Image (cartoon, rainbow, N blue to C red):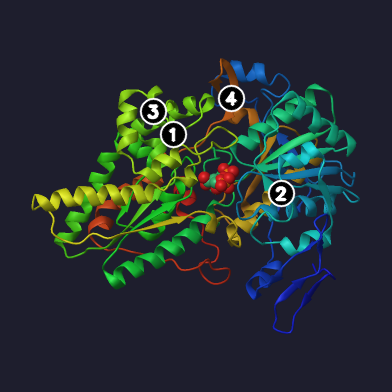
Amino acid sequence: MAAASISMLSNGDLTCSVKSHGTGRYASVYSEVQNSRLDHPLPLPCVLGTPFKVLDGPASSAAGHPEEIAKLFPCLYGQPSVSLVPDDSGDVAMNQSLKIGVVLSGGQAPGGHNVISGIFDYLQTHCKGSTVYGFRGGPAGIMKGKYVVLTPEFIYPYRNQGGFDMICSGRDKIETPEQFKQAEETVKKLDLDGLVVIGGDDSNTNACLLAENFRSKNMKTRVIGCPKTIDGDLKSKEVPVSFGFDTACKIYAEMIGNVMIDARSTGKYYHFVRLMGRSASHITLECALQTHPNITLIGEEVFAKKLTLKNVADYIADVVCKRAESGYNYGVILIPEGLIDFIPEVQQLIAELNEILAHDVVDEAGVWKKKLTPQCIELFDLLPLAIQEQLLLERDPHGNVQVAKIETEKMLIQMVETELDQRKQKGAYSAQFKGQSHFFGYEGRCGLPSNFDSTYCYALGYGAGALLQSGKTGLISSVGNLAAPVEEWTVGGTALTALMDVERRHGKFKPVIKKAMVELEGAPFKKFASNREEWALNNRYINPGPIQFVGPVANKVNHTLLLELGVDA
Ligand code: FBP
């Protein structure tokens, strides 16, 4: 597909003269690699290339508290998940034009643009004359009615490109009755047949609430979700992985591999690398499987073993001392962003601080501090000043501590230094310890999507188009059998209510899609655990290098997904 608005500069760079509607901004000049990705072919699972029908599965239940979910979603609860199967008679009405809105919600994840391309291409092929509206800036775009009409020329420069800048994203939630009303007004004004919400667990919960709301009012607008988040914690049996995880991990693994070679080359630093992943430690675990660092902390394990901060620092110091005996005074340590939230004593501190910050102002007088329990005051005072300040920062819109802003890696360096000094005084350690801190987070969220993410996202979007055309609502687009060649991937939709449980908040049940945490009995963790001692004491570093788009490893999928699918990666 070529767009007249794309032109080549004399140096081979691509310039996109497509105006980004509404902002008056022009898309940037592309590098040769970006340029080469524009026409990267996107194969589809066979079922999407043939006439198909949508097959209903058995009635669904919920991930937990089905009676409560049934009360919260009276229209949608129990509806079946569906799968697309080839069928020459094709029961899906073809060529009926549709009006579809699409929104990107939450943090960026590589591949989002391809989901939109997939939806768009499906409608162009199967529902000629359709219109696709891109809501700008996330869910706020729906509430404020801010959108752009997507055209082939508008979409083309974003194919297989990272970022969410085609329509941008946001973290607003549609929660209050007024906000639901605003959303209703927008979809009515645009006469939308469907809305695709591309987001994480919170956004897909929101998508389900919207679907229920529209259905309960007999509105024609149907809502389909798509699983997005680099964190990899929106997954289930039917939704094997969220998009973006594969690319982000590969980018971080490249950076870790480089740091490893640097560490080995100078032999003088311990690199403490904190990796994004607000709650679950999937990214850290996957990066460990790709690169074999000396120490990897997994939040879920720290929690299961009820470790304290001091236990964690001691564990690192133990490995540092053992490595020193072999003459290694360097190493690489991976730390998940959400680590401190897994440490029971810190959880308690954060919970007390959340409660206090909801009502009190943090002032010099420190009146607020007296409201902490004695053990929390003790822990708070133990923490370095910078960490104390970070724990007191403003909460995110969901009321969470902004873990991305807490520099756990620096705190651990300080704590390990203190511990090693004490060991030195006792004659138990005599080497030099120098820590270097890193945070790899935003660097991985907008990279050029790997071949896997490019193809997976396109299939998710194409599948979402098919679900909407067949009149479905309250489903999350689901593409499975991912260890097989693309042609054999399965396509369908999973009932969002089937992924839900409830949480008790402010005396009321709130529906939530439970985050999928690292399973300590799961194959990825077991593989890591069986190797960690070897990786700790010997140097088994692997430097995977940059993401490859062509060549023998271009289509390699991340270890976590393969191991979870029963394939030894
Ligand atoms: P999503 O769950 O919305 O995909 O975002 C995940 C994430 O990238 C986390 O890894 C990180 O903690 C957070 O976003 C950072 O948020 P922000 O972009 O608002 O700083």
Question: Is label 2 in a helix, a strand or a loop?
Answer: helix
Which residue bears the numbered disc 4?
62
Residue at point 56% right, 51% down?
482
- CB of mark 1 within 8 Å of CB of mark 2? no
What is the distance, in whole Å, between disc 1 and disc 3 at their CAs? 23 Å
Q: Residue at x 53, y 26 (%)?
A: 358
Secondary-structure class at tag 1: loop
Is the Cβ of the residue at disc 3 closer than 8 Å to that at disc 2? no
* Residue kind at label 4, given as amino acid type: Ala
Q: Nearer the viewer, mark 1 or mark 4?
A: 1
Could you give the CA–CA distance between mark 1 and mark 4, rounded to whole angstroms? 48 Å
Q: Residue furthest left?
A: 427
Mark 3 nearby-residue class (10 Å; few <14, some 14–19, many ≥20): some
Quarter location, residue 301 = top left
Q: CA distance from mark 3 to mark 2?
A: 41 Å
Residue at mark 3 = 348
- On the rendered structure, is 104 left or right of 134? left
Query: On the image, numbered disc 1 is attached to which residue?
Result: 364
Q: Quadrant of the C terminus?
A: bottom left
N-terminal label among 1 and 2: 1
Q: Is residue 438 left or right of residue 483?
A: left
The residue nearer to you, when weighing 372 against 159, is 372
What is the residue that sits farthest to the bottom in this orientation?
10
Q: Secondary structure at mark 3?
A: helix
Residue at mark 2? 461
